[in-house]
Image (cartoon, rainbow, N blue to C red):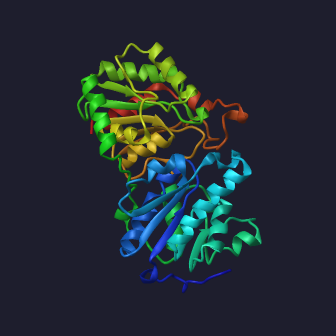
Amino acid sequence: MSYGLGDAIDLGSIRRALVVKLRHHGDVLLSAPVFSVLKNRAPHAEIDALVYEDTRPMLEGHPAIAEVHTIGRGWRELPATAKLAAEWRLFATLRERRYDLLVALTEHNRGAWLARTLGVRWSIAPAYSGRSRFWKRSFTHRFELPKNPRRHAVERNLDALRRLGIQPAPEERRVVLVPGAEAEAAIDRHLAEAGLAAKGFVHVHPASRWLFKAWPAERFAALADRLHDAGHRVVLTAAPSEPELALVREIRSRTRADVVDLAGALSLKELAALAARARLFVGVDSAPMHIAAAMGTPTVAIFGPSGDTEWGPWMVRHRVVASDRHPCRPCGIDGCGGGKVSDCLATLPLEAVWDAAQSLLAE
């Protein structure tokens, strides 16, 4: 279907809306402003989210969200009867909510099926080129994607609302993440045990689930040494996965700094509470970097093959550190030639990251 400029929706008639974002943690977190804007413009409405179960913490507690519905990533591996039962329970729950609006923020086919089966009055999804007629005809509206990558992911998410006639104000575009009282208390205990005060340490998260985005361990160790020599305590974190934990172990084996190692010990909510208490965050392009930015912590973000214009820290004081010797970046490839090692990161000098950290610490 094609629509002109006069097809803005009637926000006053929306009782409930469902926003679907089936991606990874950072992607889901950067959809948070969509909920804020929708709630601000339709305060009478209930706004729900549909995400993967492991990404629930990114939106849970958001003041604009009524309910967070989830899909298990492992559902596809279940026996047929168990998978069908899980899908039916989810569908029945969503159907009972009687949504008026469905906002699908990715190309996942579930968005099209839900738009057709939930009885929504309005539905919107990206206008991906080459998609089937089934996709195109599933939605009342489709929003255009930028022809180049130089548009931040937050703005691309908000383009769905712009297409519906909603123009977000600058102050509405902030990413909201709520750690919660339990996570706050847990981090206060960790800091007390380490003898650290709020704003008395630098939070370093050196890894990403995609290790081709990682800066070499020896340079992170050297950075920790410099921070230590300048009087800053360092807290190291990582996800509870062996590749990330191995990277932290290597950093610790190479540094003489007395670091506090919380790698693998924190939930996502606790990671957010920790980042909020840090004086500075240093890390690579990863969900923890987006978490730190959402918590308002000054951020040094190290970028290699991924695009910093699209994925850089959002609405926070920050420095992006990236190679100026590699005109091929951002290439979006998992290491040069697909070899899992990114030369633009492997050759990125310590001084570039240290200078960025110093400049933010001095402000």
Quarter of the image with the C terminus in it: top left
| Residue located at (47% from left, 64% from top) | 48
Q: Is residue 62 above or below residue 190?
A: below
| Residue located at (62% from left, 30% from top) | 343
Locate residue 200: give its quadrant: top left
Locate residue 223: give its quadrant: top left
Nearer to us in this view, 62 or 235: 62
Q: How many marks?
A: 0
Query: Quick check: 188 left or right of 294?
Result: left
Nearer to us in this view, 83 or 10: 83
Q: Is residue 44 above or below residue 268?
A: below
Q: Position of residue 220 (x, y in %)?
A: 46, 24
Q: Position of residue 158 (x, y in %)?
A: 49, 65
Q: Position of residue 63 (x, y in %)?
A: 35, 60
Query: Quick check: 23 left or right of 227?
Result: right
Q: Position of residue 180 (x, y in %)?
A: 33, 47
Quarter of the image with the N terminus in it: bottom right
Q: Is residue 353 above or below residue 182?
A: above
| Residue 278 visible within the image | no
| Residue 192 visible within the image | yes
| Residue located at (52% from left, 62% from top) | 157
Query: Quick check: 13 left or right of 21?
Result: left
